Amino acid sequence: MLRTKIVPIVMAAVIAVGSTVGVAAEQNSGGKAIQSEYALKSAVSAFEKAKITIANAISIAERHGSGGKTIDVVFDLNEGAPVYKVKTYQNNAVWEGMIDAQSGKVVGAGTTTPEDKLDQEDKAELAGLQKATMTLAQAIEAAEKYGTGKAMSAGLEETKGKIVYEVTVVKSGSVRKLVVDPNGGQIISG
């Protein structure tokens, strides 16, 4: 996935329990697993109480500014407040912002990074986004149906030279990562 700035606190917790929530993060060393597991449980609990769904957050983000295609969306706690951190591609740039998971309002102005300032991996993922025959929202719908839960995060990822959608689904407090083919919607793994 695009690794410009979104690194939720939830990610370290998810790494600690053996799953992935959607974006890269540095794994903490030395005794952080218990704290991280607690952070994951807290985030999952907050996610399950959120009024705004991931599909709503995508719709809000894509309407923000002049519209765009969502690349990445991750539920997180921002100073204790539930938010979706979202990245969209619009006007040859990547916009990163937050959507309040209770009200659906855009939090702050976010940041915009011109396409020419992205690294090669990010540019390859954008090329994959342009070639995808399904949107991230459609991949989420397929994953939720397959995993019979609610998506907590989703985004483009380059895996073994192939661009895929990774979707993390929560069901009854359990977290499960599913990989979705962006050109047909088949569940590749999960």
Image: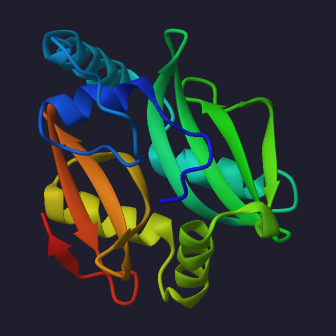
- Expressed as whole percent of the image width and height from the top left, the position of residue 155 reads 45, 59
- Expressed as whole percent of the image width and height from the top left, the position of residue 93 reads 80, 63
- Expressed as whole percent of the image width and height from the top left, the position of residue 71 reads 56, 62
Residue at the (61%, 75%) spot, across then down:
126
Question: From the viewer's perspective, is residue 131 above or below residue 49?
Answer: below
Which residue lies most toward the front here?
30
Q: Nearer the viewer, residue 69 or 20?
A: 20
Q: How is the image coloured?
A: rainbow
Q: Nearer the viewer, residue 100 or 85?
A: 85
In screen coordinates, is 147 left or right of 129?
A: left
All told, the count of numbered labels is 0
Q: Quadrant of the C terminus?
A: bottom left
Quarter assignment of residue 180: bottom left
Q: Is residue 93 visible?
A: no
In screen coordinates, is 189 left or right of 181?
A: left
- Expressed as whole percent of the image width and height from the top left, the position of residue 135 reads 51, 74
Residue at the (39%, 38%) spot, across then down:
25
Residue at the (82%, 71%) spot, across then down:
92
Residue at the (69%, 50%) spot, across then down:
61
Q: Is residue 84 visible?
A: yes
Q: Nearer the viewer, residue 54 or 18?
A: 18
Quarter assignment of residue 30: top left
